[in-house]
Image (cartoon, rainbow, N blue to C red):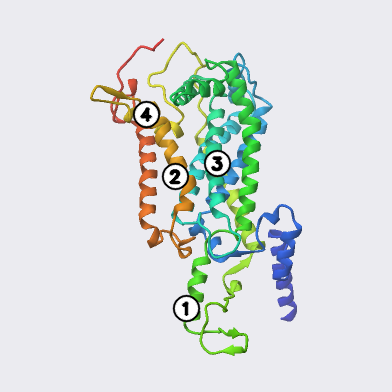
Amino acid sequence: MANETEKTAVTTENGRKFLWSFQPKSGKDAGESIVRNFLLHWFPAKSAERSLSWGYSFYLGTITFALFLILVVTGVVLMFLYVPSVERAYQSVKDIENVVSFGWFIRAMHRNATHLMVIFVFLHMVRVFLGGAYKNGLGGGQLRPINWIIGVVLLLTTLFLAFTGYLLPWDQLAFWAVTVGTDIARTIPLIGDEVRFILIGGHEIDQNTLIRFYVLHCFFLPLLMVGLIVYHFWRIRKDGGLASYDTIVNKQEKIKESNGGGKKTYSLLGITKGRTVEVESTTRNEDAHTVNSIPHLIRRVGLVILATFVFVAVMSLFMPAPLEEAANPDVTPNPAKAPWYFLWLQELVTITTFTLFGITFDGGFIGGVLIPGVLLIALCVWPFYDKSSKDATGVWFAKERLRQNLVFIVICFAIILLTIIGTYFRGPFWEFYLPWEAWPDLPRIL
């Protein structure tokens, strides 16, 4: 009987080693392994149990990082096959789709991962805001507001990465989407024409624009993204991990203090009766709320990255990347739409263009520059104006943050609604059509 028990134990241990080769024998062993490893050093030795739950953060940041890894890998493969030339760009993409083995699949994964990354960066930002995780918690030396601003810059970089890559197929969809997108920059007062000139490398979208977008998309923006991601991860580590359990521990300690549990107050003459705020200090029992990052956190991160890769791969089997006819500057599609993640701006420009008392207000400036600019500035400075207490840090829908959360949700839903309207309800001449209504037959605009 004893021999069978020993054999079962050995088999179980071998199975654990096969699935997870490293099994730390103590918390100290697990912590030291993270410190010694360059990659694992991004993670703290211990992680809050609540931050590991699937329902707290939904691992949106990890999913976004996994999507970026997919973009890097597939993008490097596509670089070997793509020719950044006006004369050959479209044909090279067509060869990727129809000649290169599994080229259509690699391109589909790259495009789908791009769109998903835009969505998940946005969702990650929403999660951080609604959870009040952009505010400093109980720990010392935290700079969560700065990391929130880094996150906003990451969102803008993601949008610009997607936008610069949108032109590279050099088909009608890409050409006119970028045309509409860059025309919005022209509405900036005083410097609009100069901004558009710098962006496209001239007055027209041509070879200069293509090579400029190609270099930005394949080198400068990915390099900037890597630097921001590394700092973002490092800053999370320095801030004590996700802002998930500070408030719960603080409330438990307050209850403990009110009951007089385990508290001693010292004076210059020794132990005294009662409690004095000036001299007492509280040591939180962090071991009761944390677990070793190895293997708990690392295993979950690996699982999320693997699941993201599988999801994008399966998605790409059923949603191949589109490729329309070659770009033709002389044939204007009707309607001409910006990339879907900028459609809310295009719709906002339409809404804010109106005439009042004989005065025409420019929607290009109001909807394309002023309103987005105000929203962007508000996002960056809001952590410094949020007066909610530290008890609300890391708490979903905290009552004291109810009003600002409602305003934020309304703004997000407005952006989503404008995007849906621009995608499905706008037809020729940017007129409003219901999805089931047929568009009139119109000749091509030359």
Percent x, y of residue 412: 39, 44
Q: CA distance from mark 3 to mark 1?
A: 40 Å
Name above or below for residue 274 compared with residue 344. Answer: below
Which residue was labeled with disc 4? 349
Residue 255's disc number: 1
Which residue was labeled with disc 2? 378
Report helix, strand or loop for mark 1: helix
Report helix, strand or loop for mark 2: helix
Q: Residues within 10 Å of mark 1 (few under 14, many from 20)?
A: few
- Which quarter of the picture shows residue 83? top right
Q: Quadrant of the C terminus?
A: top left
Q: Residues within 10 Å of mark 4 (few under 14, many from 20)?
A: many
Percent x, y of residue 428: 34, 21
Q: Residue at x 36, y 27 (%)?
A: 363
Q: Residue at x 58, y 58 (%)?
A: 142
Q: Earlier in the sequence, mark 1 or mark 2?
A: 1
In front: 228, or 318? 228
Q: Earlier in the sequence, mark 1 or mark 4?
A: 1
Which residue was labeled with disc 3? 153
Q: Which amino acid is tagged 3? A: Val
User: Which of pointers 2 and 4 indicates the residue nearer the eye?
Assistant: 2
In front: 304, or 256? 256
User: Which of pointers 3 and 2 indicates the residue nearer the eye?
Assistant: 2
Report helix, strand or loop for mark 3: helix
Q: Which amino acid is tagged 1? A: Ile
